[in-house]
Amino acid sequence: MNNTIAMKRFEIVVGIEQLERLTELLEKCSVRGYTVLKNAGGLGSRGVRDPGDVLMEQENVMVVLACKEDQAQKVLNEIRPALKGLGGMCLISECQWVEGPAVSY
């Protein structure tokens, strides 16, 4: 593939009450961008979290980011010890960043 860069993709799920701490860790690692998906549902160590349940008091968020290998190691070194306190999970996978053509309007 032309114009691609090998990267690591992080998918991190935590309770919304832990989001600020997580973003602080990412900023400490100089992460330049990430996406936060609120109302993430599923089954985990804390049981079922159904975002459609109006009585659900605890909300999950998913943070997605991609970075180069050297920065990924820094992120992992920061997140690994913190995840026990944050709860949740972190998935790391290989991905490709695709550079698109320049667009002018």
Image: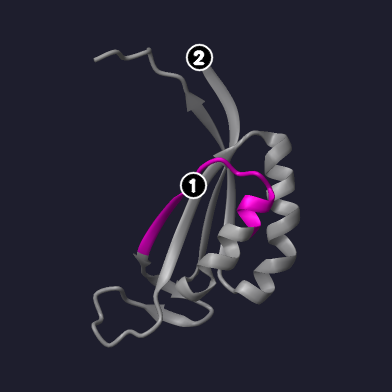
Q: Which residue is mark 2?
A: 3
Tell me the SS state at disc 1: loop
For the residue carrying disc 2, how many other residues have a C-alpha within 10 Å: few (<14), some (14-19), or many (20+)? few
Task: Choose the circle earlier in sequence order: 1 or 2.
Answer: 2
The kind of residue on which mark 2 rests is Asn
Question: Of residues 17 and 51, which is closer to you in this image?
Answer: 17
Is 21 contained in the magenta span? no
Residue located at (30% from left, 73% from top)? 51
Residue located at (73% from left, 36% from top)? 70
Quadrant location of the C terminus in the rendered image: top left
| Residue 55 x/y as whole percent | 27, 88
Label 1, label 2: how many angstroms apart (C-alpha)? 21 Å
Residue located at (39% from left, 70% from top)? 42
Tell me the SS state at disc 2: loop
Tags 1 and 2 in contact by the CB under 8 Å rule? no
Q: Which residue of the protein is positioned furthest toward the bottom in this rendering?
A: 55
Image height of 6 relative to 80, above or below: above
Stretch of the chain drawn in magenta:
25-38
Question: Of residues 27 and 44, which is closer to you in this image?
Answer: 27
From the viewer's perspective, tell me whether residue 5 is left or right of residue 100. Answer: right
The kind of residue on which mark 1 rests is Tyr
For the residue carrying disc 1, how many other residues have a C-alpha within 10 Å: few (<14), some (14-19), or many (20+)? some
Image height of 100 relative to 26, above or below: above
| Quadrant position of residue 84 | bottom right
| Residue 52 x/y as whole percent | 24, 75
From the viewer's perspective, tell me whether residue 64 is left or right of residue 50. Answer: right
Residue located at (39% from left, 75% from top)? 59
Q: Which mark is residue 34?
A: 1
Between label 1 and label 2, give the one nearer the viewer: 1
| Residue 19 x/y as whole percent | 51, 66
| Residue 18 x/y as whole percent | 54, 72
